[in-house]
Each structure stands twice: as structure tokens, then as C-alpha cells.
Amino acid sequence: MAHSVTRGERLSWAAPEDVLAGSGLRVAPLAGAGNSSVHLEIRLCELPPGAHLPSHLHPFEESFYVLSGGASVATADTGYRVREGDYGFAPVATPHAWRNDTDGLVRWLEARAPQPRPIGDAHGTYFAPDHAFPATLPEPDETDPRRRYVGRFSDDDMAPYGPLTMPGYHGPNIRSISIRMLVDQLLGAQHHTLFMVEFAPRAGHGNAAKEHFHPFEEIYYLLSGTALGTLDGEQVRVSAGDLVWTGVNSSHGFINEGDEPVRWLEVQSPIPPTSDAFFFDDDWRGIE
């Protein structure tokens, strides 16, 4: 089965190869067709002060999580000033744009699904010249019922550690975990989810994530801590800045042997079914 690990210290930054080349945007691929993925594309993006991404749209969803810095983002008829901890989403064929009107670099993790592909001679990204930033750009407010496409994550959002409960699975095989959904169907996504995951310190074997597999792909972008993963039988240690990709039916599990929490951003694509989304190796081995 397929899996890959991309190390944070080995990233390769370059301008994009589509119509956004020349905008000042730089991207570092983390997962995609080059890793045998067929459902998604994950990359880091950064935009220097004074640069902007012109309004564009494409035949895939795109979500982001701001890792550092700040910028202004316009999606459809909305616009917001975003900063570290903010997240957002552009549906299929929805015009959106970025503008860095701060004095520092802005960097974000970006997820795209379905996986981008060329259409004819184009790269699948098209300018949207009639789209513009609105005059007013508030910050995301989770209590504003008019809020669309964006949100703000806070450490206070993380629930106490416990067994996993989320669409597709709840049960004892994944423990000592806290999750906070960011981009999902509630926000309008149809092809992927983005959420925050944290494992408690000293969550060892039997008390973290037992080995399992899915009918969808996943990525884990480490934000803090160090995790020990078992990927199709291979043991791999990953730390902040690293990314793990697991393909459909790839067996994987994680523990946290350290004294600090392990936190990562996770993406799933396609969106998991509402049942039978997780299959645990040990459960099936026990059937005679």
C-alpha cells in the first residue's frame, strides 16, 4: 500500500506553473500525484508583503490554514483579514483572491480536492476578472451568523482528551485524542475535510491511534511535538514541519511517547462515509 513522508527541512520552493506565476506566490509541494495520491494535493504557500493573487477559480475545492503572518482574502462576495490560526475555503468554481497588505510574509497550508489536473492546454486555473475585494474586510468571527467560507481556530476550541468521535467512527481504538473540525460539509466542502488533531502526552500503544485503514486518503501536517507512526509496517518518527500521506487502504497508526502533546492538521479526501470509515487491523485479526 502507498504512503509517504515529506520532511520539513527538505522542501523545494518555487513559483506555481499556472496562471498565478508572476504573482509573487511561492509554493512547496507536500503531497499529490508525485506521491501516488489520486484524490488530493497539499502544499505550503507563501506570499511576500505587497504581493497579491489575482481573482481566479478552478474545478476543485481549495482550503487553507494560516501558519504565520496575515493577509486579506476575498471569496465570492465576502472578504476577511486573516492571520495565524484562521482557516478558509473556496468551493468549486468560486472566485477568490489573496492580498498581502501587511509588512511581513504570510504562509499557509493549502489543500485541494479533487486533485487538480490540466484541462486541454490549461492548468485548470482561470482568471476571474469581474471579481473584486469588498470595501469592508472584517476578521473572522465564529459568532457572526453572516460568516461564510472562513473561521478562526483557538486553543480553547480543543475538547478534553478522550476516545475519537467523528463522522465515520466512534469507539475505543483511537484514544487520548482531541479534534476540532475546521473545513467540512458544514462550511460547504464536498470533496475534503480539514481539521485539527491533538494527542495527549505519553499516549502509548493501546492508548493512542491503533493501526487502521480507510477508503480515503489522509495527510497529517505536524505542528508541534513528535509522533511515532507505523505505516504499512514501517516505523517512522515525525516532528513539526513534517507531513505524512497515507493512501486508500494504507495501514497506519500513531503513538505519542513524548512529554508534550502532538498536534497536527489533518486532511481527508474523499469525505469519509458516515459509517464503516475506519477498519482496525486488530479487530479483523480476531475473527476466526
Image (cartoon, rainbow, N blue to C red):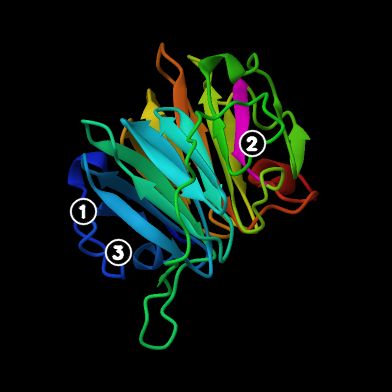
Within 10 Å of disc 2 (Cα), the crowding (few <14, some 14-19, many 20+) is some
Q: Is residue 6 visible?
A: no
Disc 2 designates what residue? Answer: 147
Q: Which mark is residue 24?
A: 1
Question: Residue at coordinates 41% horizontally, 13% vertically from top-left?
Answer: 260
Give the left or right position of residue 148, taking residue 260 as reference.
right
* Pointer 2 with pointer 1, Cβ within 8 A: no
- In the displayed structure, 109 sits above or below 124; it is above
Question: Residue at coordinates 65% horizontally, 45% vertically from top-left?
Answer: 184
Of the numbered discs 2 and 1, the one sitting upstream in the chain is: 1
Give the left or right position of residue 11, taking residue 29 as reference.
left
Disc 3 designates what residue? Answer: 20
Q: Amino acid at mark 1?
A: Gly
The image quadrant of residue 140 is top right
Which sits in the foreground, 132 or 170?
Answer: 132
- In the displayed structure, 116 sits above or below 277; it is below
Q: Which residues are magenta?
A: 176-184
The image quadrant of residue 106 is top left
Within 10 Å of disc 3 (Cα), the crowding (few <14, some 14-19, many 20+) is some
Image x and y of residue 258, in percent: 40, 16
Q: CA distance from mark 2 to mark 1?
A: 29 Å
Which sits in the foreground, 189 or 170?
Answer: 189
Q: CA distance from mark 3 to mark 2?
A: 27 Å
Question: Residue at coordinates 22% horizontally, 31% vertically from top-left?
Answer: 104
Element assignment for label 3: loop
Within 10 Å of disc 1 (Cα), the crowding (few <14, some 14-19, many 20+) is some
Image x and y of residue 125, in percent: 41, 70
Is 94 within the magenta? no
Of the numbered discs 3 and 2, the one sitting upstream in the chain is: 3
